[in-house]
């Protein structure tokens, strides 16, 4: 006979099945009813099995029990998953340490894996799922807060760094002096070498976001020997000046004049390219000396106009006065720059009476600045 009694809906199977209170009764049903069921044209059940969802025994026509064994394994695994979830949650609430970032990251990843597995094996509301979700949420909020604190701390550090005075060591100051001398003597390779070292030291000493005018001016000046387009023009000027110095005694007046004209054109190009005047001071100095010794048609020398002399000397004197005021204020770097300009303006007028007075003043002031630099380094 086809089963009609004790029928219930089995959630595991998803359909209605007969339910027996014991295996013995389920097996007796198969033994006493199988022949009759077959005779009526139906397929008789072949075995019984326990259903944990229904809390009793069912019978089935399927002789293969692998499916049911797999279901049993899944059901046996669920309690273990729940136990592991509870253990990780307990550890989090009792021993969470923000310093052990790597360890807790692994624990939280494991907790998420367990939650996913529990979702697959146990559909519906399970207390452990809620426990794990709260734990993961608390952990992620903690990480977020910690990250925000780190960002804020770094911002404070950056602000402090930005407000600090840029440090230029006595060694760096000495190297700037060497760079100035290398420019004066037309040593292009030495200029490039020193500029590279100083650029590295300045960037390392001061954060990139630091906008101190002193550092910016130093870096801008060094760029003359770091940017290819500027290096090319300076190198060409230096080499042509050296060549003219070596051969001007063997050249005619017109040939020397043409070479000087070419150099002046190159100097104009360099100025338009942004090259600092101080780096070309050696070249202009040599040009003036060559011009002073360049014979004119009657065997004399080419001299500048008196008005030009007076204007240049006056401007040079003003720069010296400006440098004195800056030294009194303690603004040594700006004073050095003013003295460099004064010295450049004086080129060609050193032999005049006023020129000699200014040169003497320049010597005294440069010695004062050098002495102050040594004192500062000793204090450090």
Image: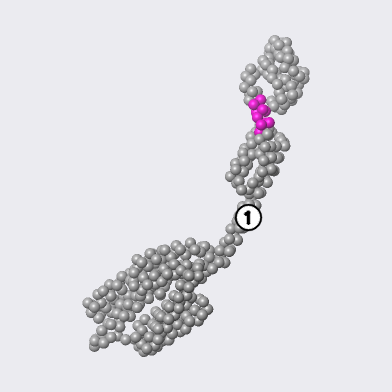
- Asked if residue 78 is among those painted magenta in the image, a careful observer would answer yes
Asked if the stretch drawn in magenta spans residue 338, the answer is no
Give the main secondary structure, helix, strand or loop, of the magenta stretch: helix
Residue 23 coordinates in the image, percent (x, y): 72, 17
Q: Residue at x 65, y 19 (%)?
A: 62
Total numbered badges shown on the rendered structure = 1
The region drawn magenta spans 71-81
Image: 258 above or below 210? below
Q: Nearer the viewer, residue 147 or 236?
A: 147
Q: Which of the two residues, 272 or 174, is positioned nearer the viewer here?
A: 174
Q: Is residue 283 left or right of residue 246?
A: right
The residue that disc 1 covers is 149
Residue 33 appears in the rendering: no
247 w.r.t. 156: above or below: below
Q: Is residue 84 above or below residue 23?
A: below
Q: Position of residue 179 (x, y in %)?
A: 39, 70
Q: Position of residue 237 (x, y in %)?
A: 33, 71
Which secondary structure lies at badge 1?
A: helix
Residue at 32% of width from left, 77% of height from top?
Answer: 286
On screen, 95 above or below 174?
above
Which residue is at a point 69% across and 43% down the rendered structure image? 93
Residue at point 39% right, 70% down?
A: 178
Q: Quadrant of the N terminus?
A: top right
Q: Residues within 10 Å of mark 1 (few under 14, many from 20)?
A: few
Tell me residue 296's x, y (percent).
26, 85
Answer whether residue 30 is visible to the viewer in this image.
yes
Q: Is residue 305 left or right of residue 89?
A: left
């Amino acid at each position: 006979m086809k089963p009609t009694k004790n029928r219930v809906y089995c959630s595991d199977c998803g359909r209605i099945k007969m339910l027996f209170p014991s295996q013995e009764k389920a097996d007796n049903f198969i033994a006493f009813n199988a022949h009759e069921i077959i005779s009526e044209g139906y397929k008789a059940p072949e075995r019984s099995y326990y259903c944990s969802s229904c809390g009793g025994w069912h019978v089935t026509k399927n002789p293969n029990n692998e499916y049911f064994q797999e279901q049993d394994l899944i059901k046996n695994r669920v309690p273990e998953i729940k136990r592991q979830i509870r253990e990780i949650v307990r550890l989090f609430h009792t021993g969470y340490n923000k310093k052990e970032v790597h360890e807790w990251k692994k624990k939280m990843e494991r907790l998420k894996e367990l939650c996913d597995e529990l979702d697959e094996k146990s559909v519906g509301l399970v207390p452990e799922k809620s426990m794990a979700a709260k734990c993961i949420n608390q952990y992620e909020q903690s990480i977020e807060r910690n990250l925000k604190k780190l960002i804020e701390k770094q911002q404070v550090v950056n602000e402090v760094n930005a407000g600090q005075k840029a440090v230029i060591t006595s060694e760096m100051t000495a190297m700037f002096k060497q760079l100035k001398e290398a420019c004066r003597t037309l040593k292009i390779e030495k200029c490039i070498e020193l500029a590279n070292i100083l650029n590295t030291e300045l960037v390392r000493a001061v954060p990139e976001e630091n906008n101190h005018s002193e550092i910016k001016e130093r870096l801008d000046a060094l760029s003359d020997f770091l940017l290819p387009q500027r290096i090319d023009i300076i190198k060409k000027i230096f080499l042509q000046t050296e060549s003219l110095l070596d051969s001007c005694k063997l050249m005619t007046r017109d040939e020397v004049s043409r070479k000087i004209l070419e150099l002046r054109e190159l100097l104009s190009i360099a100025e338009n390219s942004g090259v600092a005047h101080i780096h070309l001071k050696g070249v202009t100095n040599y040009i003036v000396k060559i011009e002073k010794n360049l014979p004119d048609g009657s065997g004399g020398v080419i001299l500048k106009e008196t008005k030009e002399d007076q204007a240049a000397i006056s401007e040079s004197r003003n720069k010296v006065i400006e440098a004195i005021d800056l030294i009194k204020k303690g603004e040594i770097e700006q004073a050095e720059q003013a003295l460099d300009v004064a010295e450049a303006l004086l080129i060609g007028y050193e032999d005049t009476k006023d020129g000699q007075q200014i040169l003497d003043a320049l010597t005294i002031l440069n010695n004062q600045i050098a002495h102050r630099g040594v004192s500062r380094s000793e204090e450090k």
